[in-house]
Image: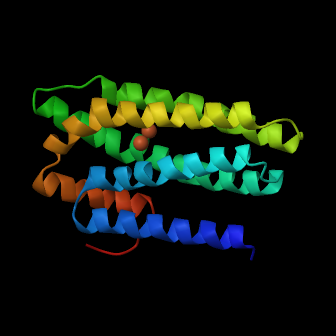
Amino acid sequence: MTGFDAELEGALADLAARRLTAYRAGDATGILMADHDWLRPALAELRSRARGGADASALQRLVGAIWEVVDGHSRVEEEVYFPAVGRLLAEAGRPNPMVMAMAAEHDALPDRHRQPMEALAAGRDPLPAIDAFSRALLVHFENEEDLVFEDAREALQGDEGRRLARAMAAFLGMDEPL
Ligand SMILES: [Fe+2]
Ligand SMILES: [Fe+2]
């Protein structure tokens, strides 16, 4: 295993530990925040390595690892978290149309991921596509945090939050029972 791969494996283990901490606290939104907080420096690292002229295969592995986290994260949002939060807010008389708008923002992400992968595979300069990939994700995280997570945290106090955290952990294959 190269130093690069060992580092990546360590970073992914760190992410799993952070997700577990949020899950144990019954904090459904915290599980998603663990991902956002891990992805922000990971994207900064990707941009800096791309600028530093890292070789294409190392950049492909890093983009691939980041994408795997983003993809699982987006799926648990779409299939578990957003539907529950949308329902709870509607029941509380505070419907939030931004919940489904955030799911719609996911539609552009596969293309944002495909572009740097194609540039790297073709030996083209990957920087513009890596910057666009990173920017799209950072804007999306900020939208979710400002427009949905803040509201959601209020609706997810106590048992509702714990129940949702359990459903998300099961979806994500975090197998420790709570
Ligand atoms: Fe999202
Ligand atoms: Fe998210």
Q: In the displayed structure, would residue 52 be above or below residue 24?
A: above
Closer to us: 130 or 112: 130
The answer to whether residue 173 is visible is no
Q: Is residue 62 left or right of residue 76?
A: right
Closer to us: 159 or 133: 133
Q: Is residue 65 left or right of residue 37?
A: right
* Residue 67 image offset from top left, x and y in percent: 61, 48
Q: Is residue 53 left or right of residue 93?
A: right
Q: Residue at x 48, y 47 (%)?
A: 40
Q: Quadrant of ligand 2?
A: top left
* Residue 48 image offset from top left, x and y in percent: 65, 47
The answer to whether residue 10 is visible is yes
* Residue 70 image offset from top left, x and y in percent: 53, 47
Closer to us: 167 or 24: 24
Q: Residue at x 22, y 65 (%)?
A: 25
Closer to us: 11 or 105: 11
Q: Residue at x 29, y 22 (%)?
A: 97
Q: Residue most toward the front?
A: 52
Q: In the displayed structure, would residue 69 be above or below residue 26?
A: above
Quadrant of the snapshot with the C terminus: bottom left
